[in-house]
Amino acid sequence: MRCVAYPLNRHDARVRREAQRQGLTCGVAGGPAPLTRTDPMALPAPAITPWDDTLLPMRARWGVDARTPLLVAWVLGPALDGLGRPHPSALPPRTWNLAHHELLGNGLVSAGVRAGGGGLERDTRLAWREGAWSVNLAARRGVGPDGGSYAGLGAALNLGALNLAPVTLAAGLDSGGPLLGGAVALGGYGEVWGRASRAPDGWTWAWGATLIPADYVQVSGAQDRAGAQLGLRAALPWQSGEGRPLRLGGGYRWGEGAGPYAELEYRVGSYSVTAEVSGARRFGVKFVAVW
């Protein structure tokens, strides 16, 4: 065999490297058509849906498939949310890695809602990879009692894909001005990242790491000016033939949203839904689609 179809369309830089190490020369990853040159180790493919008779001809002609409405909603939603109403500035999402590449497939979209603390906070993320390059977007609304907002957009270049170094560099703009970021891959065991941006009272920063010490186990941490958090997530050995779709996690937050939290994630193919409860009397739900 020369080509691999990644199970459930899930892959990242570690998986693509391993496929090449085993002598494979191409991989099928699903997802929308690329904007530029195709990555031979992550070729796009149409989403499989009950409406294929209609969608597949559209895909063949215009590159449109079942994910297109999702992508449009994830881009327009943050732009239109609260349009015309003034919002005080908020800090970037604490866990937003502007320069992620090691744990990124061809792209992802996510939307989260968290209730409690006197309001309804919305968090939207979008990442799109084109070979060594990626574009990353993050937006927050309804942060804190004043309903603060944040929006940031950046581009990242992975030097490892160019055989230079296991480093990704990123730059862009956000609500406060210039935005900088970087990440270092940890030899297949995760990555460490950092981010800096302008705030109304000066520069603000964040750093974090995602570690994979064993199969189906992930340890993550992040810290910014408003606080820190540390978490652990593990997949349960249930329905192992389906990629262990049920995952339990938990951890603790300091500063903003302080207190313990627990989360339950269920994956359905390349989609996942996560429910979270925290000691700060907050409840949240997050939807993620990857390809």
Image (cartoon, helix red, strand yellow):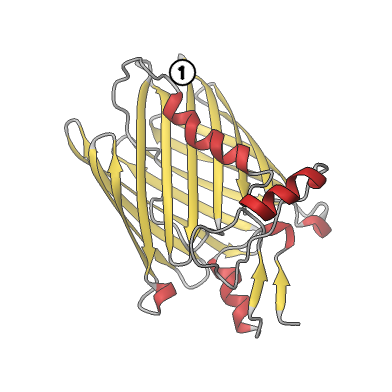
Relative side of 236 to 223, left or right? right
Horizontally, residue 209 falls left or right of residue 288, namely: left
Q: Residue furthest front?
A: 61
164 up-or-down from 114: above or below: below
Q: In the figure, is residue 213 to the left or right of 66?
A: left
Is the residue 87 above or below the residue 38 in the image?
Answer: above
Q: Position of residue 84 (x, y in %)?
A: 36, 16
Query: Does residue 163 lie above or below 95 as drawn?
Result: below
Quarter location, residue 99: bottom left
From this viewpoint, is residue 257 visible?
no
At horizontal 40% and vertical 80% (from top left) the residue drawn is 163
Q: Position of residue 37 (x, y in %)?
A: 50, 67
Q: Position of residue 20 (x, y in %)?
A: 60, 80
Query: Residue drawn 65% across and 64% down?
Result: 215
Q: Residue reaching furthest bottom?
A: 23
Helix, strand or loop for disc 1:
loop
| Quarter of the figure with residue 286 | top right
- In the picture, measured across the screen, residue 184 lies left or right of residue 64, that is left
Label 1 belongs to which residue?
Answer: 117
Q: Which residue occupies 80% across, 56% down?
A: 242
Quarter the N terminus occupies: bottom right
Q: Amino acid at mark 1?
A: Gly
Q: Foreground residue, 164 or 143?
A: 164
Residue 3 visible here:
yes
